[in-house]
Amino acid sequence: MQEKRGMQEITGDDRSIQELLSGSSYGIDYYQREYKWGSKQLSELISDLTERFLENYSEGHIAKNVAKYGQYFLGSIVVSKHDDLRHIVDGQQRLTSLTLILMYLNNTQKELPNKVDIQNLIYADDFGEKKFKMSVPERNDCMEALYKGEDYQPNGQSESVQNMVARYNELPELIPEELRGEVLPLFIYWLKEKVKLIEIVAYVDEDAYRIFETMNDRGLSLTPTDMLKGYLLSNIDDVEKRKEADKLIKSWLLKFAEFGKDIESDFFKTWLRARYAQKIRERKKNAKPEDFDVIGTEYHRWVRNNRGALGLASSENFNQWVIRDLNFYAQIYIKLLEASKTRMSNLESVCYNADQGFTQQFLLLLSAISPNDEQSIALQKAGIIADYIDCWLNRRLWNFKSIAYSTTQYYVFQLCKELRDKDVASLRSYLRKRLEEEDKEINFDEPVYLNQFSAKSLHRQLARFTDFLETESGVPGRYEDYIVRSGKNAYEIEHIWANHFERHLDEFEQQMDFDRQRNMIGDLILLPKKVNASLNDDTYEEKLPHYIKENILAQSLHQAGYEKTPGFRQTIERHNLPFHPIAVFKKKKITERNNLYSALAKIIWSPNRLVQQVDA
């Protein structure tokens, strides 16, 4: 495409990632500088890329086969070109995310014998200096660290830098096993050569902004929600009922908008998948999209094509589906959205699961809920399922198993079908038995340890331990404080042993053995960021007087933590927990604390939770 206007022109060409990033560098225009993508958007992108790649891949393929693989269109970007730098007017979220993925893949393939050269898609060699293809000065230090695979602390940095670090650190969980090992180079070839974008280039800023505004003009394109709304209303013959249904839908769309962009589409996808989807696409070559997949991209069209299965045979059916079913599930969905933001009675696990970044929980929560349920029963069912998810997730995380969308999607969908329309008693019984069976394979017997992949989940598990002990001891729990990981009020994982191997030569001959023991969960607690920094190099004996001033888990190391604390002592006795003060913190004591934390985990995430929950 090429449009000429006097001496100016606007061009549009489809380009592979290789073509886009191997040429000019891209800058970010001042008015849209922040990178804002969250876990959900990155997870969906990787899931889409994975599915499209695996549609083509077959075992035994080599790099040459990738040349015949199908393409994947990732949308368009709008840039304003000045000399060798192209300012991104629209599309930086995708390009930044792709750059993070490329850096992670580049680091992951380092040990492979047939690695693919993609460094030129990440940076250019500018007379001996690195010049990143996403050229934003305030992000360079972060980009350099991530490119080298180094830990980077974004404290005090811009929102973009904090989000980039958070998304990069999630990639080990998001990249599925199917893409690892000998398959990885083939995926990288496909990603750089077969994933395409339309690059629309203007040579005057005003033209670029006009294109951006035109493409994003809300009046020019209908969303799937708009089209579904139109379809439903057009099938309600009674004018007054149609007006009532229209008013109702609009009111819910406004409420969804209060929770953020795309929430209304998330609602329709989740509701329809949870209640109606029967099949999901298999991960193999030429597998066709099934109900689950079509709903994810074209739920408006899926409803129209499946009106019979939905019972939409008459005008009154359509009317009832809006004023009864849609209205009912929208109410529940809003309640669950609220519960995901802050702990609510009997729905605490909804918040815990959201904090773990598990984006599929609403699919399971809605699956067992029928429009014939009273709202109190519906929320009770949601609470039971959320408790199961909480137990299931933490077992997986403790055992270093992925909870990423791509890894768990099939499991979640199959469980969703199993839970549909179960009553409260059946739901409790079924999920408890399921958890007991799973407990035989993945449990809390072996201690978990800290590494770059487990840091986030371990932080949350330590927060849960601390909050649990406080609540059980009659002290207000402060879970919401403990899970803050950045900013001046952040809590950090504190190693009880400082990083000084030379202090432990009596127990360790090798630095590696010391590091392994130091990173076991038994050597970890949570402390406020400022306190953690101030104690960084202190010996255990020097730290101990400070611990008594902190949370209950830190206090438990000190003798005074057991004095004048009847609630804590009763908690220890009630749950038979092996707490005791520690004057000298040796290797054996870390093992004891490992066992203590395992005991706490078994209590907090016990299958018995699904029985003990008090009915509303």
Image (cartoon, rainbow, N blue to C red):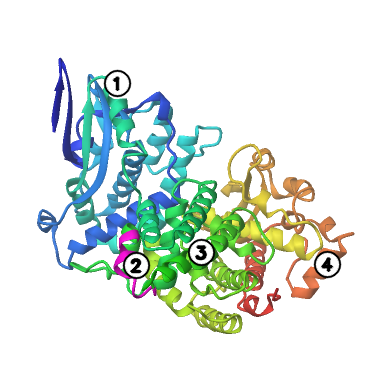
Label located before the other in sequence (4 or 2): 2
- Disc 4 crowd rating (10 Å Cα; few below 14, some 14-19, many 20+) is some
Please state which amino acid type lies under the numbered disc 3: Ile
- Separation of disc 3 and disc 1 at Cα? 48 Å
In front: label 4 or label 3: 3
Query: What residue is pinned by disc 2?
Result: 292
- Magenta residues (range): 300-311
- Figure label count: 4
SS of the residue under disc 4: helix
Quarter of the figure with residue 184: bottom left
Query: Which is more toward the observer, 489 or 335?
Result: 335
**Under tag 3, what secondary structure?**
helix
Q: Is residue 169 left or right of residue 55?
A: right
> Going by the image, does 163 lie left or right of 341?
left
Q: CA distance from mark 4 to mark 3?
A: 54 Å
Mark 2 or mark 1, earlier in chain: 1
- Distance between mark 1 and mark 4 Cα atoms: 68 Å
Question: Label 1's element?
Answer: helix
Q: Identify the disc placed on residue 569.
A: 4
Mark 2–mark 1 Cα distance, whole angstroms, equals 42 Å
Q: In the rendered view, does 174 fall on the left or right side of 187?
A: right
Rendered image: mark on residue 323:
3
- Answer above or below: position of 401 versus 170: below
Q: Earlier in the sequence, mark 4 or mark 3?
A: 3
- Residue located farthest toward the right when viewing the structure as drawn: 564
What type is the residue that disc 2 sits on?
Phe
Category of crowding for the residue at label 1, using alpha-carbon neighbours closer than 10 angstroms: few (below 14), some (14–19), many (at least 20): some
Crowding at mark 3 (Cα within 10 Å: few <14, some 14-19, many 20+): some
Q: Quadrant of the C terminus?
A: bottom right
Q: Quadrant of the N terminus?
A: top left
Q: Of marks 3 and 1, which one's residue comes earlier in the chain?
A: 1
Whether the magenta-drawn stretch holds residue 475 is answered as no
